[in-house]
Image: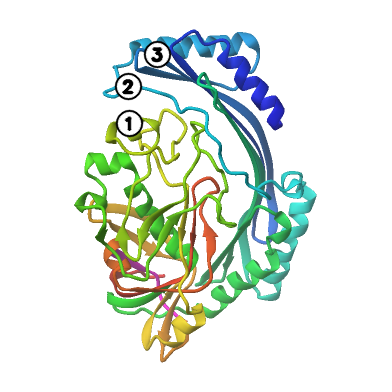
Amino acid sequence: MDKSAREHLAQHVLAMCDCDAAEALVLHDNSALTRFTHNAIHQNVAYADTTVSIRAVCDSRTGVARTNALDDGSLRAAARRAIELAKLAPKSDVETALPEKAPYATVHDAYISATAQATAHRRAHMVSDVFEMAYASELWCAGFLTNSAQGVTVANSTGVLASFDTSDAGLNVKMNAADSTGYAEAFDHDIDQVDASAAAKVAASKATHSKAPEPVKPGLWTVILEPPAFGELFSYLIDHFSAQAYDEGSSFLCDGIDRRYMSENVNIWDDFSHPLAPRMPFDFEGAPTQRLALIENGIGRTVVTDSHWAAKLQRPNTGHALPAPNAAGPMPRSTVVLPGSKSRQELISETQRGLLVSRFWYIRPVDQRRTIVTGMTRDGTFLIEDGKIAGGVRNMRFNQSILEAMRSCELSNELRRTGSYFYSTVVPAVKIDRFCFSSVTDF
């Protein structure tokens, strides 16, 4: 469904809403996936759907109803349901006001037609490069390649009408040997920029060079986390920048805005305009999204808001609403950890003894306020000795405060995107002193 059709649908739905204020959010998703294992494709799937979410406001009470049935009868039923739910809902502690119409940035090159229109044949051709590398390396591979196009339109009764189209492609590759594995990933708006051969080469090299992994003692280690590992770890910090978490006391920023929390070399932005970021210039209420310095030279600067939390905390609306209703409140969607000055290889060569971590797995929170998490290394963990990679080591479990890790770190000079598209992170590799590993596995 193109922009014009979505906008017509959203405005048509608003006309059905007899309430104080109303909002229509139209989400169109057209996605396809090729999944492979043991050096062969075993699944092709495709999905297309359009969902309309209707938010009704009645006397500062809010109700939301959704439908993907787009006939008039179903849309009217959803509108009635949203209004009924609003009348039954508790009254908000602040006056509920939907965002007013405001200009938002124009974003170029977020939608690439070649990505949106890539066929199963095209995906098969790309993953065949992965198979060739697996066979040449005497490994077997597993993973998936996706391509998708998304369209977002928000309209409300105050005059907001905002639309955005984007495309995305992503490759996930795991190479497997008898006692070792290697991982690589690649993402881009443009499927032509997803280099399957390069990703396969990285994954194969990790699997090959981590064969016969040796155990090392748990304890405090100097670690270099490659972007997939750092991105996964960092993702558990993102909700701390929500105004809701700040108000409810679960954010580390509750200890004070404009206070130092990380090393002076750490700068974290929420920047929708970054070339590697999702690029959506407004939020799911249609409010313009602001570029924000979340951490500036290690100092915590702000939290993100939506219309509700801006009113409640008497702060500006930064345009970070998620689709209503949601339990998490506003959230950064385009976090970027700014790079440092050294290459990944320089970080390794300057390490006397440490561990290189390709990826983390199954991270879980332990202490939210103190940012303590636990998880496992996976798919390529290596010992560094005298500035060189000495060989593979067995996977290890860690228990670590993310804030403490970020208080003694160096950042590489190359950024990579990790994570799902609308909520991705853009990060460099990072070198951390005294990273706490609590136990070692048998593999």
Number of marks drawn: 3
Residue 359's place in the image compared with 273, above or below, is: below
What is the magenta range?
392-400
Q: In which quarter of the image is the C terminus?
A: bottom left
Residue 399, magenta (yes or no): yes
Residue 101's place in the image compared with 189, above or below, is: above
Residue 213's place in the image compared with 167, above or below, is: below
Label located before the other in sequence (3 or 1): 3
Residue 41, magenta (yes or no): no
- The main secondary structure of the magenta stretch is strand
Mark 3 closeness class: few <14, some 14–19, many ≥20 residues within 10 Å: many
Badge nearest the viewer, 3 or 1: 1
Whether label 3 touches label 1, CB < 8 Å: no
User: Would you name the residue on which mark 1 appears?
Assistant: 311
Instruction: State the separation of the CA atoms marked 3 and 2.
Output: 17 Å
Q: Specify the amino acid type for callout 2.
A: Glu
Q: Which of 313 and 154 is in front in this view?
A: 313
Q: What element carries label 2?
A: loop
User: Would you name the residue on which mark 3 appears?
Assistant: 85
Picture coordinates of residue 125 (x, y %)?
Answer: 78, 58
Tell me: 411 left or right of 218: right
Instruction: State the separation of the CA atoms marked 3 and 1.
Output: 22 Å
- Name the residue rendered at 63%, 15% in the picture: 12
Whether label 1 touches label 2, CB < 8 Å: yes
Q: Which mark is residue 95?
A: 2
Picture coordinates of residue 168 (x, y %)?
Answer: 64, 49
Q: Specify the amino acid type for callout 3.
A: Leu
- Quadrant of the image occupied by residue 85: top left
